[in-house]
Amino acid sequence: MEGADTRITIDWSECPLVEVVPGKVSGAPLVKNTRLPVDAIAGNYDAFRAEGLSPDAAIAETLDCYPEVSVEAIKTLLAYRDAHQFQAHRL
């Protein structure tokens, strides 16, 4: 279907690093106690991988963009996303 929106939305409610607070950043899933959207972090990682960076280099570059998030947190968020993307709802 041409022009169809192929984005997926993941239910982050069971990820211990993520919170959704109505009215905070429009209710987007955020890294707990921050205003950092999980989708922004994952999107940066994906963009670096698309540029040909290795997974470790893409994580390092993502960390440079979001220094308030740890390497472990980035890895946990990506692992959660990967484990749940097939259960996600298509928009």
Image (cartoon, helix red, strand yellow):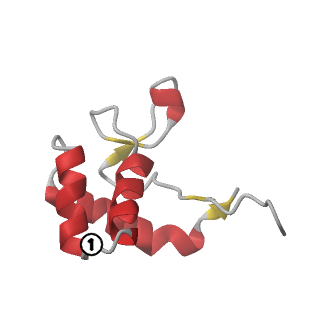
| Mark 1, residue position | 53
Query: In the current view of this chain or complex, which residue is farthest to the front?
Result: 51
- How far across and how far down the image is residue 42, in percent? 38, 57
Q: Residue furthest top?
A: 23
Closer to the camera in the image, 83 or 45:
45
Residue 36, percent across and down?
A: 34, 38
Q: Amino acid at mark 1?
A: Leu
Query: Which residue is found at the position 40% from the left and 47% from the top?
Result: 40
Image side of residue 77 versus residue 60, left or right: right
Residue 29 on image: x %, y %: 45, 43
Q: Is residue 25 left or right of residue 59?
A: right
Secondary structure type for disc 1? loop
Residue 46 as seen in the image, left or right of residue 27: left
Examine the rendered structure and indicate whether residue 15 appears above or below residue 69: below
Residue at position x 53%, y 58% in the image: 10
- Nearer the observer, 67 or 91: 67
Image quadrant assignment for residue 50: bottom left
State the count of labels.
1
The C terminus: image quadrant: bottom right
Residue at x 25%, y 58% (from the top left corner): 74
Q: Residues within 10 Å of mark 1 (few under 14, many from 20)?
A: some
